Amino acid sequence: MRETAPSALTHNMKILIACFSRTGHTARLAESLSRRLAARGHELSFESISPLEHPNRWRLVPPLWPAIPLLPLILWVAPFRNWWFKRYPQPEHELAPLAWPDASGFDSVCVGGPKWLYIAYPVARYLTAVEGLAGKPVASFATFCGPPLDVFEMQMLFTPIRHRVAARDARLASTLAVSSGFHEFFFFNEMEYLFRAISRLVFRRSLSDFAIGSAWADAEIERFCDELEAAAGAFP
């Protein structure tokens, strides 16, 4: 993979990369992304988004139960989906103190975490708690088990994130999501096998084709960096 020179439209930026990773997959994506941004000449700082408690996987599920009966409407009825994304009850987790509670000293902020149907609970709290986002390009990166399904994966994660970022007077400059190929539910990794089948059925491709380290993921990281640089160049 060639290294891309910093865009002529932007200066070398100070970038805060804030990441929550429950199982290590999103941390791997953050490492790949940071290497690419550093190669472009940007100065990076890192924030570990850490919940005060680390509940077991089964305690993560009950807050999502209200959405389960509505999934057919969310997936297939766009007006309802748009309405739901603005009003659904987003769970949050209390966070340990942040190393960078105020991001005003950075040119841009990249926020990452896994997809938990919508926004991972610690990431949702971070987007509410961190100061200094106003007027900045904010970018979001994520991992999920499946392939990049437009509605179930991409829209169900990044549309709520876009709303939260807008509520902080910032703009979502770019999004990046790759497959982890991992899902810890239910008892025998049933969801992994389901998403592998969906990838073959919908995309005619192996799920590994969308994973970290794949040619597809490398191209997506390049696009993400290009869009972040372009957005930063558009801000004063």
Image (spheres, grey):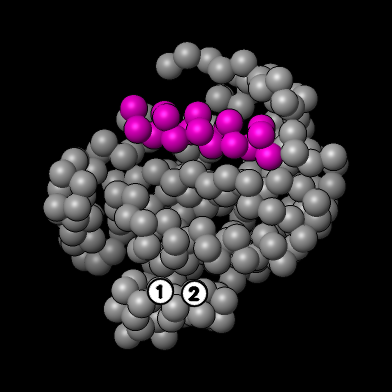
Instruction: From the image, tell me which residue sits under label 2.
Output: 82
Rendered residue at 44%/35% (across/down): 220
Marks 1 and 2 close (CB-CB < 8 Å): yes
The answer to whether residue 52 shows anywhere in this view is: no
Disc 2 crowd, CA 10 A, few/some/many (<14, 14-19, 20+)? some
Rendered residue at 25%/38% (across/down): 208
Residue 168 falls left or right of residue 183: right
Instruction: From the image, tell me which residue sits under label 1.
Output: 78
- Measured in 3D between alpha carbons, the distance from the residue under mark 1 to the one under mark 2, in whole angstroms, is 6 Å
* Nearer to the camera, 90 or 183: 90
Regarding mark 1 in the picture, which secondary structure is present there? helix
129 up-or-down from 110: above or below? below
Was residue 225 drawn as part of the magenta stretch in this picture?
Answer: yes
The boundaries of the magenta stretch are 215-231
Regarding mark 2 in the picture, which secondary structure is present there? helix
Residue 75: x %, y % from top left: 33, 72
Rendered residue at 57%/76% (across/down): 86
Residue type highlighted by circle 1: Ala
The answer to whether residue 165 shows anywhere in this view is: yes
47 up-or-down from 162: above or below? above
Residue type highlighted by circle 2: Asn
Residue 153: x %, y % from top left: 38, 58
Was residue 135 drawn as part of the magenta stretch in this picture?
Answer: no
How many numbered tags mark residues here?
2
* Nearer to the camera, 33 or 85: 85
Rendered residue at 31%/59% (across/down): 184
